[in-house]
DNA sequence: GCGCCAAATATTGGCGCCAATTATCTGTAT
DNA sequence: ATACAGATAATTGGCGCCAATATTTGGCGC
């Protein structure tokens, strides 16, 4: 009973009728700190596939309640980022070898199409964004593994954004995440995810509006990534989560 | 739990070394009856975009509890099939005009690639499945609108299945659903979703392994669907009850 | 009659408790 | 020492209750 008069934004209330779900801010669960935290932890490979995501542990780490955690986990399960097993809990999703290959194949399809569309509708703003990203990627510290991973993902997301299709952008985001899981599951130790020189090449070809060349470069780039993973048989992961979540939870509480 | 039991403490308990979640039943929430019910109701256009999905009503309708309904609704919200607004409830998702166009553009990308892959790996089983579906579609009752809609969707899903990529298949399923919502939102009354002759043509071209022809036919087919929708300005969406009562009132006034 | 304001109602959101299930630990026998 | 079995702790799943918010209804003034 504190805000008796929030004063709706538009005085255009011609309809005394009710049913209008529009005109409300669609704050999604994607903006949830827990979801964001787990997502970044996964994309930065700080959470390994198969790791257990206990509800109580996450709740104390993020400083929220268990119900909130459950909502976040079931959302991530719907996006196939975590795997929920009845009465056992939630685990970071571990794709099969076939699924990993399918993810890369899907990325070849989606991202080559994104390159094509991005070139078609490339304008001044898009060129500036692309150049700015290439600057950042050229200048970044290659020894900082987390920054490298973030920049790598951002490049592909930026290309999808330049394509101007929000549905395609969503699909690219999902595929990027699942690629992280696929690579984390099947990578050979010590190798980077992307070859460092691929992104400048692709970016330059996009800026030059060389559609065939850019598409070929992107396809080749994704194939190169795919060839760095190998099927593997059995391995058990060790639980190292407490420290990670403690740190992430502290950062979230601090308001980072 | 932190200090719920100060009586007996055995801190000797080690960290839970979790078993690898393999060899468990992968029963997902997609198999949930509520999710399936809402999904089929939407794809059959029995639930219109913007319709309110009240928890209590759904709970009594499906004969289950409210918590179960909430899980199903949040899952569907993660898949962008329903829209959840805080403190207001869940509604059938209503895409914007731009999103509807993006959905069709994404389908052109994904489904032409699916056609290509399907032709590449077409084998005896695939040919048989395709022929069987074409038989069913040729023989079905065109006046049964729900059956027509189901068969239409099944054709596109079958092509995605023949492509042999599960990730691509998931994406096609999502796009089919969202297409249903886009068409239901922006369709002109009285027109069918798919032109009736398009599927046999595409199927025949796939069976003939005419890759360029099949891709072109699929792209044209999707463009044809897209051209049947129009943006609507006067968004005065009259809700169902007022429409019914308006009609009844008119009839009463006319007939005495 | 029309439009705005306030009480009443309905619906959603969240938290605590307890049952069900799983995983772990301990004890005993081979 | 290993293996099996029972007991016990920990974790997840589900339900009821109650607060918070939105929607509808009723009332008042113009």
Image (spheres, coloured by chain):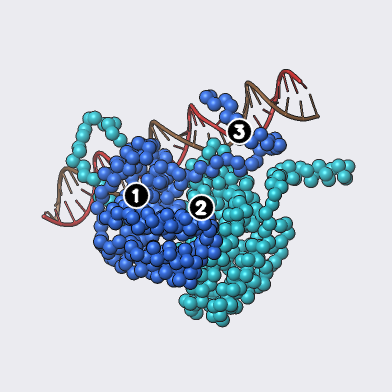
Chain colours: A blue, B cyan, C brown, D red
N-term mark: 3 or 1: 3
Q: Can residue B10 be seen in this view?
A: yes
Q: Where is residue A141 in the image (x, y as percent from the top left)?
A: 30, 54
Secondary structure, mark 1, is helix
Rendered image: mark on residue B79: 2
| Residue B163: image location, x then y, percent | 49, 71
Which chain is indicated by disc 1?
Answer: A
* Whether marks 3 and 2 lie on the same chain: no
Residue B55 shows in this picture: no
Q: How far apart are marks 3 and 2 (CA)?
A: 30 Å
- State the image coordinates of residue C1 (x, y, percent, origin top left): 80, 29
Question: Do the numbered discs 3 and 2 sit on residues whose CB atoms are within 8 Å?
Answer: no
Badge 2 crowding class, 10 Å Cα cut-off, few under 14, some 14 to 19, many 20 or more, is some
Q: Which residue in the structure is indicated by mark 3?
A: A8
Marks 2/1: CA–CA distance: 22 Å
Front disc: 3 or 2: 3
Labels 2 and 1 touching (C-beta < 8 A): no
Question: What residue is drawn where x is 37% and y is 54%?
Answer: A136
**Which residue is drawn at the image coordinates 58% and 49% (left, top)?**
B93
The quadrant holding residue A231 is bottom left
Pointers 3 and 1 in contact (C-beta within 8 Å): no
Circle 1 residue: A41
Residue A3 is marked as none
Residue B102, placed above or below residue C11: below
Locate residue A106: give its quadrant: bottom left
């Amino acid at each position: 009973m504190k805000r008796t008069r929030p004063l709706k934004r538009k005085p255009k209330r011609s309809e005394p009728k009710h049913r209008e779900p529009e005109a409300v801010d669609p704050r999604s669960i994607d903006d949830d700190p827990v979801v964001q935290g787990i997502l970044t932890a996964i994309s930065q490979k700080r959470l390994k596939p198969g790791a257990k995501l206990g509800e109580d542990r996450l709740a104390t780490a993020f400083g929220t309640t268990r119900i909130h955690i459950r909502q976040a986990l079931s959302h991530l399960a719907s996006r196939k980022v975590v795997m929920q097993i009845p009465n056992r809990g939630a685990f970071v999703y571990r794709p099969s070898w076939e699924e990993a290959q399918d993810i890369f194949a899907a990325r070849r399809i989606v991202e080559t199409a994104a390159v094509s569309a991005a070139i078609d509708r490339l304008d001044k703003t898009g060129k500036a964004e692309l150049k700015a990203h290439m600057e950042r990627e050229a200048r970044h510290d290659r020894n900082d593994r987390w920054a490298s991973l973030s920049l790598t993902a951002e490049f592909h997301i930026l290309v999808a954004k330049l394509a101007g299709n929000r549905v395609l952008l969503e699909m690219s985001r999902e595929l990027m995440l699942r690629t992280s899981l696929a690579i984390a599951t099947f990578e050979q130790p010590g190798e980077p995810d992307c070859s460092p020189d691929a992104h400048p090449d692709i970016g330059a070809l996009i800026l030059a509006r060389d559609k065939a060349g850019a598409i070929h470069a992107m396809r080749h780039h994704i194939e190169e990534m795919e060839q760095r993973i190998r099927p593997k048989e059995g391995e058990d992961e060790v639980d190292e989560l407490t420290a990670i979540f403690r740190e992430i939870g502290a950062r979230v509480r601090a308001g980072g």
